[in-house]
Every structure is written in structure tokens, then in C-alpha cells.
Amino acid sequence: MSLIALLPGDGIGPEVVAEARRVLDALALDLTFEEAPVGGAAYLAQGQPLPPDTLALAKRADAILFGAVGDPQFDALERRLRPEAAILGLRRELGLYANLRPATLTPGLEDASPLKPDIARAIDMIIVRESNGDIYFGEKGHRTGLGGVREGFDLMKYDETEVARIAHVAFGIARRRKRKLCSIDKANVLETSQLWRDVVNEVSGDYDDVELTHMYVDNAAMQMVRNPGQFDVILTGNMFGDILSDEASMCVGSIGMLPSATLSSWRDTLGLYEPIHGSAPDIAGQGKANPCAAILSAAMMLRHSLNMMEAAMRIEGAVAQAIAGGARTPDLGGSLSTNAMGDAILAHL
Ligand code: GGG
């Protein structure tokens, strides 16, 4: 029996995680679930976004299914109390450093993409986003500068071990795909990116069979809409990966379609699975959220952490069939509720 830590979080998080849970329950797998508060919900209940019991559950679970965190009502709080501190804390405490974000156009969603259909159909990439370092985790602060001017700073930092381990993950994935890896940085301006590029080049020596290219992030953002089919595996840092994956999600129709897995150095098989979207407080509680990304994240969980390949494929097949059959939430131009989209997927399991 595998233990799943269910951390629904804030906004639309609980709504989409509920649909993922329904799908998992329908498969009657050998799973048991324990739920705990996280993010703003945890702050309201217990005064902190990542309470010790929630972290302890995440540590003893076989996998974590996460919804989303964040809400403007917490904007005035100090950073360590804000909902986002929960997901960053989980990533750091559990060594969740490899955030895998696959982006593929689900057949039928050509109309939802702003790209020409042929260009959108060619999208089949995975973004390997480093998620334990970078500007997210460097020294931060506010200070008063010369002349009493207020300053804010976030130190962007990587060390070579952090770059090497994520590069190995990306090269390993590239080996199982088209053997093409594009590393994205800003090495013409940033020292962290120069180190990043040097280390990725060094690691590439272990992967002679993978074609490595480098691209500046500004060019990559442009290429992502011009010719996204050129990308197979993208390797990039925490901040650039966050931004580029949101861009990739729109190219395939909606941010409501993109799942993710974040894999751990803490325990090999442990992973945190979450839709790439945030808590979307503007539509929370209205049944408008697209649950596909959360449901597909559950499929990634079965595949990566629980070795339940067949069940993962059944979920992915059911999502594809529901979409092919015309099931659409509002983000995809339709009118199905979150729950009705879940029903449409369940009907194809
Ligand atoms: N499900 C994704 C989520 O909750 N995102 C909120 C957030 O602020 N995440 C930080 C990040 O991934 O950059």
C-alpha cells in the first residue's frame, strides 16, 4: 500500500486535486491518502504555511500530490509566512531539485492555441527546471542605500554541484527521447549563467550521444512561439524555467493542461506532483478550473514514484479521449465545470 500525501492548498488547488483523487479512486489502486493543510490555508489554520505535521507527512509519504498555493490576502505578510513559502520549503526540505514540465499539444486543442495548427501540433517538449537554487533561494533582503533610497535584492547563485546534478537529469531524459538537449541561460550577461554553461558542457562529456545546444533565454522566449517544435528537452534554471513553462503552456492551449513532477535527492523515488498553474484566486470556488493538469500530474506520480505504468497510461488516455470528444473547460473555450470535466475523463477510464 503506497501512502499519498494530499496537499490541496489554496484557491483552485482543492478543486483540481479533488478531481485527481476521484480519478485515482476510480482505478482502485493500492493507495492510501492522508491530507494536510499547506499554503494560505495552513497559515489561517495554524499560523504557518508549512506546518511541521504537513512536512512530516510529506517526508513519510511515497509521493506528494500538491494543488496550488497563493492568495493576494497574504501579500502584506513577511516572506516566510506567505503561502509560496510552503512550496519553496517543501522543495528545499525534501531536496526536490528536478522539476519536470512536459508540454505537448493534446490532439483537438489546436483551436485553443494561439499558434498556427501545424506549429502547435509539432510541440512535444519537456522542460527540466532546476528547483532548489537560483534567485529563488539566494540571499534576499531590503536595505537603505545611498541617500536613503530603499533597495531590494535577491542574490542569484548556483554552485557547480547543483548545475551538474540537474544537467545529469536532463541528459538522462534526452537519452530516452530524441537525444536533443537545449540548455537555456543568459551567459552573455550573468555569471551564474556562465558557470551554468561551463558545467553543462562538462557534463555533456558523459553523453556523447546527445546533441547539446545553448540558447539565451530572451531568444528562447521568442523561439518558443516562432518554432516550438525545435525543442525536445530544455534544461534551465529555476526562474527561467518558471517563465518559459508558462509560455509553453499557452502554446499548447492552456496552463490548465500542464502537469509537473519534482524529483528528489532526499529519497530517490519520492516526488511532488502538481499542476504548473497557481491558485487562480479570481476563479476559485466557481467550478471553472481545468482539472486536467492536476489529473495528469497524478498520472506522472503513478509513473515516476509508484511504478504503476499501466494506470498512468489509462489516465493519460482518458484525458486525451475526453479532449478529443470535445470536453472543454472555460480556459479551453468550453463551458464544462471542473467536476463535469472530471466526469468526462472518468467516462473514458
Ligand atoms: N502549483 C503551482 C503553484 O502553486 N505555484 C505557486 C508558486 O508561487 N510557485 C512558485 C514557483 O513554482 O515558482
Image (cartoon, grey):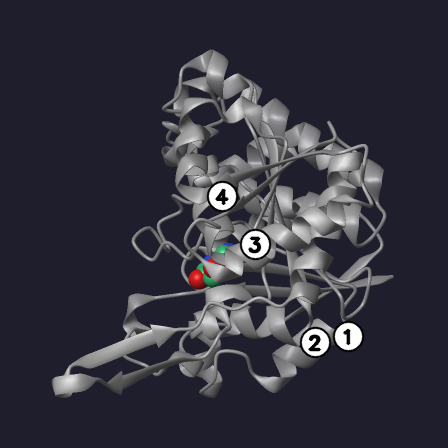
| 9 over 118 or under it: above or below | below
The percent coordinates of residue 219 (x first, y second) are 42, 36
* Mark pair 1, 2: CA separation: 5 Å
The percent coordinates of residue 246 (x first, y second) are 44, 43
Q: Label 4 is placed on what type of residue?
A: Ser
The residue at which mark 3 appears reads as 17
Task: Specify the label residue 57 is tagged with.
Answer: 2
* Mark pair 4, 1: CA separation: 30 Å
Whichever of callouts 4 and 1 sits on the residue coming sooner in the sequence is 1
- Residue at 82% across, 49% down: 29
* Mark pair 2, 4: CA separation: 29 Å
The percent coordinates of residue 341 (x first, y second) are 51, 36
Please tell me in which quadrant of the rendered image residue 106 appears. top right
The residue at which mark 1 appears reads as 60
Query: Which is more foreground, mark 2 or mark 4?
Result: 4
- Viewer-side residue, 167 vs 283: 167
Q: Secondary structure at mark 2?
A: helix
Circles 4 and 3: CB atoms closer than 8 Å:
no
Specify whether tag 3 is near ligand 1 (CB below 8 Å). no
- Residue at 41% across, 23% down: 226
Q: Label 2 is placed on what type of residue?
A: Leu
Q: Label 1 is placed on what type of residue?
A: Arg
* Mark pair 3, 1: CA separation: 20 Å
Q: Label 3 is placed on what type of residue?
A: Val
The residue at which mark 4 appears reads as 245
Q: Secondary structure at mark 4?
A: helix
* Mark pair 4, 3: CA separation: 21 Å
Please tell me in which quadrant of the rendered image residue 79 appears. bottom left
